Structures are given as structure tokens and as C-alpha cells.
Amino acid sequence: MAAKSTTTIRQVLSYQPHQAAWFAATQTLFNRVCAFYFEVIQTHERVLDLSNKEALTALEKLTHATQNNPAPVMALQEVAQDIPAMFRRAAINAALGSARSFFSHLSTWRKRKEKALAKGKTFTERPPVPPRTWDKSVPFYVGQWRERTASSILLKIWTGTCWSWLKVRITGRELPTATELGSPSLIRRGKRWWLHTPIEKRFARPATIEQQVTTNPQTTICAVDLNLDDHLAVCTIQTVEGTILATRFIGHGREISGFRKKQLGRIARNRKQTGIIAENEQDNVDFWNKIKHGDEHIAHLISNRIVQFAQQHEATILVFEHLGNLKPTKGKYSKRGNEKRAYWMKGRIFAYAKYKAWNEQIITSRVNPRNTSRECARCHALVARYQEGQPAEGYTQGAPLVLCQRCGMQGHADRNASLVIGQRLITRYQQPSQGKPQAPLRAERVSKGTGVEVCQEAKSKEEPSSLQARHADRNEHGTAQDVLLGMEKHTSDIPCQLRLPGES
Ligand SMILES: [Zn+2]
């Protein structure tokens, strides 16, 4: 069976300074049309009950004057004249995506409110607000671009006074052949304009995790433990039968967290000075952007390295632990904010790694996070976790070292956790009826004196949690749709892919 994935090719555009103003004018116009259609949808909410294709037709009927439809209810012409059909459709699809996201958030909020009120609780959560500003990139549907070569493209651009075909030079990564091209988008990054083109790749669907784990003991798994203190990600490679092949420590979490904390501290101070307390207020836009871009960048970097590492060792499965819930701790604003963003970043790294892995035909899954850091990867007894130079006892959260009193295993705490994560995925697919012990760790075989018996005992203790994990989520691999939905805004603008992700 065929599967597909989508990636984005990013290319730099060369243009004259005055042409940059045209790009900006085109984007401004696009967002004006988007905002208009969002309004139309708001006043005709039932449109959202339709499929995207039907909604598009309905919205055009409501807004677009034709011979048969001379007086539409809300004429687009009153907002913007001479809008090309494909430009209008791109804007309608963008508005539909935002509207679907907004109304689904709103309905979740209403349900939560109802539930709280029914229980006699007070409900203070604020309702989601529709977008106040629009900053969408312009996708160029077929008809809005032509004559694309490796080094140039013609784009239909709004100059501020008229529509005109503009030839722009393209540099950067060339488009691979034998792929399906989506609509290119004009993207502003800082002061430069880029052309982003989504491309689709088709490949044979990889075997499910269950098939791989149960039929081939050489199946190689890359397990990832995400942390936000020192090493952002610790990855281990192991086979289903338990041979550990490699380990990699990625990232400098402390530096990143320190950078973020500094920015958040500045925001807190600014807020104090200006008296702004509203958390949703877009104050200190600069700082937030800095942090946001920094985090985005890091999430991409880390996820790239994870997938590269998995590829190097020909892993076909990538496994993480579930994120669990964010438990807010008391403390300074900057500390809480930092934790929140760090939590968000873990989710980002997972999401990016998942779609990037899928592009390489690697399936991603998640396991139960319970006690992954407290369990010995070799014999599954509880470990002591401690700082270097401290006695090897107790459990110090976040400390780098572990020692297992039972089997003598000693090592890096995050590496141990990563091994446990990988093993959990394997046990999930092993037949519990066979009473088969957890795959023995061939490369780190237990020293004499601590036999298999101990391992089995420990295994049976672990049964409940691995059973829980079994039900947690089978085969959580990215489908093509997942991939698309998880991508950045612009990839959603492929005309045939009308389901749009929410507002970021
Ligand atoms: Zn042990």
C-alpha cells in the first residue's frame, strides 16, 4: 500500500527593493480578503457544517457577483475589487481553516463552561477570541504562477494599484524530480521574501510496529528521552532482542533554558513598569518573538538530529514517552513561564520528529511515561538517582547518575530512561501469555550472581504498567494527513488539501 509524506522546499527570491513592497502589498490584500471571509463565515456559521469544497461554493455564492448572482449578500467587491478567482479561493480556504479552528475552540470552551456551571462551580476561563490581526502568507494556486524553472518563476502580484506578472529569480535548494508539487507560498522571514513549496513523496507503507516487532528480532528502535535541563534529548538504539547499539546525547538545555528565562524575566520587569498585567495582551512583542523563534529553531534542530541519528543506525521505529500533564509549580513568573514553554517545546520536538521520521519511513510511537526514570533498564528494579560526588542512594529528581542496587547497573540517568522507553514499546507487543521475560539486554548482560530469575521477578512487577502502555496508543505513526496537519501554516495551502491546521 502506498503512503505519502509532505516536506517543504524553501528557496530564496531575488528581487528589486520596490518589488518587495509589491510582495507586501499582495500579502496585505490577501489578509484583508481572509479577514473579510472570516466575517462572512461568522455571520453564516452553518457554512462550517459543510465540507470544505461545499463551503467554498457556498461562500462564493454569498460574496461573488456573477451574471446569475448579481447581488450577493456580502459582496467581496465592496472590500476589494478585481480579485482573481484563485487568489479569492486561497483566501477562502485560509479563512475556513481559521474559522474551523476558532469555532472548535469556542465549542470546547462552551462545553467546559456548561460542565463547570452544572457542578455549581464558578467558571472564570476566558472564551477564545477570533483573530484580531491577520498575518497569513499568500499561497499561489495554479493560475497565479507559471513558467517555473530551476532558477525563476512568474508570480501574479498585486502592486498596490494593479495585478501584474512578475518574474523573480529563485536560488536555494532545487526541486527534486518525480514528486508532486503543491502551491508555492510567498513567505516573509524578517526582511527577506522566500518561496516555500510543499512537495509530496510517495513510498510503500512501512510495516506496522506490531509486525516489525513480532516478526523480526533485528528490528531496530530508536528511543528518545526528552529533558529540558541538560541534554535536551538522549537517544539510544536497540534491537527488539535487546542489543544496545548506540547512544547519543543532544543539545544544551541549560543554555537554552537560561536564554529563555532571561527574556521572560525582562518581560516580567517590563510588565511591572508599564502596569500591564493581562497575560493575553501582546505586550513585549519583540521578546516573545525572540523566544518563540528561538524555541522553534531549537525544536527543528533537535528533531532533525534525532531523526538523523535514527537513520544512521537504520532504525525503523522511533519511540518517545507520553508528555503527561503539565504540573505548574509555584514560583516566579519567569520560572513558571519557562516551565510552560519548556513543556510546549517537548511537544514541538515530538511533533516535528514524528513528521520528519515519517518522511524517512520511520514510524513514531509513544509509551507510558510512568517511572521511566526510576526503573533499571537491565533488571527493572527501582534505581537510586544522584549527583556526582554524592552517595548513590535515594532519588534526586534531575540528577545525572543512576545506580541499581539489585543488579549493579550504573550509568547516566537519561540514557537509562531512554532504554526503558524503548523496552516498553517492545514489551507492548510481546505476547503476555507466553510469559516471555523482557528482551534481555545482550550487550549489557547482567553480571554473574544476578540471574534471569531476578529479571523475571522484576518483569512481573512491571506487568501492570506495560499492560497500561499496551493500551495507551497502538501504532501511533503519522499518516499523511497527520503530517500535513502538523506542518507549518503554508503547507496547508495545497489546493487539494483543504483541511487546514488551526491558528498558531
Ligand atoms: Zn538493575
Image (spheres, helix red, strand yellow):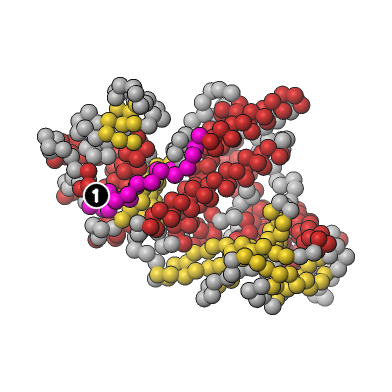
Whole-percent x, y for residue 187 in the image:
69, 58
Q: Outermost residue, front direction?
A: 389
SS under mark 1:
loop
Which residue is at 29% across, 60% downward? 211
Which residue is at 45% across, 35% downward? 230
Q: Number of numbered discs present? A: 1
Whole-percent x, y for residue 422 in the image:
32, 47
Note whether residue 256 is visible: yes
In terms of depth relative to the viewer, which is nearer, 448 or 275?
448
- The reply, left or right, for residue 183 in relation to residue 180 is right
In terms of depth relative to the viewer, which is nearer, 416 or 345?
416
Which residue is disc 1 drawn over?
Answer: 242
Whole-percent x, y for residue 261 in the image:
59, 31
The secondary structure making up most of the magenta span is strand
Figure check: 86 above or below 352: below
Residue 38: within the magenta?
no
Q: Which residues are magenta?
A: 233-254
Whole-percent x, y for residue 423 in the image:
29, 46
In terms of depth relative to the viewer, which is nearer, 101 or 457?
457
